[in-house]
Image: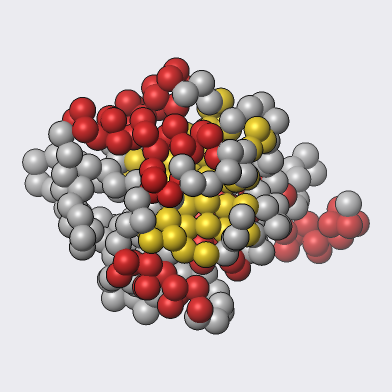
Amino acid sequence: MKYNRLICGDAIEEMAKLPAASVDLLIADPPYNLGKDYGNNIDDKTWHEYEDFTRQWLTEAKRVLKPTGSLYVFMGVRFIAKLYVFLEEEFRLNFNGWITWHYTQGMGRKTGFSPRHEDLLYFTKSKQFTFNLDEVRVPQKYFRERNNMAGANPGDVWQFSHVHYCSAERQPHPTQKPEALLQRVIASSSNEGEVVLDPFVGSGTTCRVAQVLGRKWLGIEINPEYVEMSQRRLADAFTQFDSIDLRMERVPKDLPKIAANQPSLLMK
């Protein structure tokens, strides 16, 4: 199978062409069925049509995953409960996390609470899977002997800013995800040289980050304009990710005092 390439086509049809058990990590950001215009298609299905679409692509996703593979799926609030039931009860995958991506700015509402998050479901094909905690630790807030000073587990609420429309990194795509969010997923749930598949490429973030992290990658996208946009993005030289978890910049609050009074502790 040829890797490190973008495929222009329907996700279900193109995944059906891939060998079974050939993918280590599948990250899917499918349309949320909210009526968004994606250029050559509009995300506007009936409820039952959307359920059928979801079942079809999940069937192929499970088939192409290796027995040790992991699946992450972004989803909006209107369908995520149904998606969870599909993954756990219908597809018999193993639940490993419900991650909330919290962003600080978004659409305002006057007759309800303004949305400030999206969700990411994390399932594995079996109970044997990759999870590289040391690759995604965040600095501790305080120095404590009982803490692992290599860093803390980042938890399941992740705060990353949107890629704002005024940002130089912003692509002409309505649902672009921040690179650092995908960096945490790919670094934790795959190893260098393993295969990452994104069946709904969109702006190309997953493929871009997989490339930077030394993974083999495959991307499928139905809109040829988005394929061209992603190809340009993949060809750009890498300098830094377009977003960060602000906790990555913190220093334990009592570290200066510890260093002055008990420097030997820092050597442990």
Q: Position of residue 24 (x, y in %)?
A: 62, 45
Q: State the residue in front, 22 or 35.
A: 22
Picture quarter containing residue 267? bottom right
Q: Is residue 185 left or right of residue 109?
A: right
Q: Nearer the viewer, residue 258 or 167?
A: 167
Q: Residue at x 9, y 41 (%)?
A: 111
Residue 253's spot in the image, x, y percent? Answer: 64, 57
Q: Is residue 103 left or right of residue 59?
A: left
Indicate whether 120 appears above or below 230: above
- The chosen color scheme is secondary structure
Identify whether 58 is placed above or below 245: above
Q: Quadrant of the N terminus?
A: bottom right
- Relative to the observer, which residue lies in front, 72 or 42? 42
Residue at 84 percent of width and 57 percent of height: 266
Q: Is residue 136 above or below residue 65?
A: below
Q: Residue furthest front?
A: 17
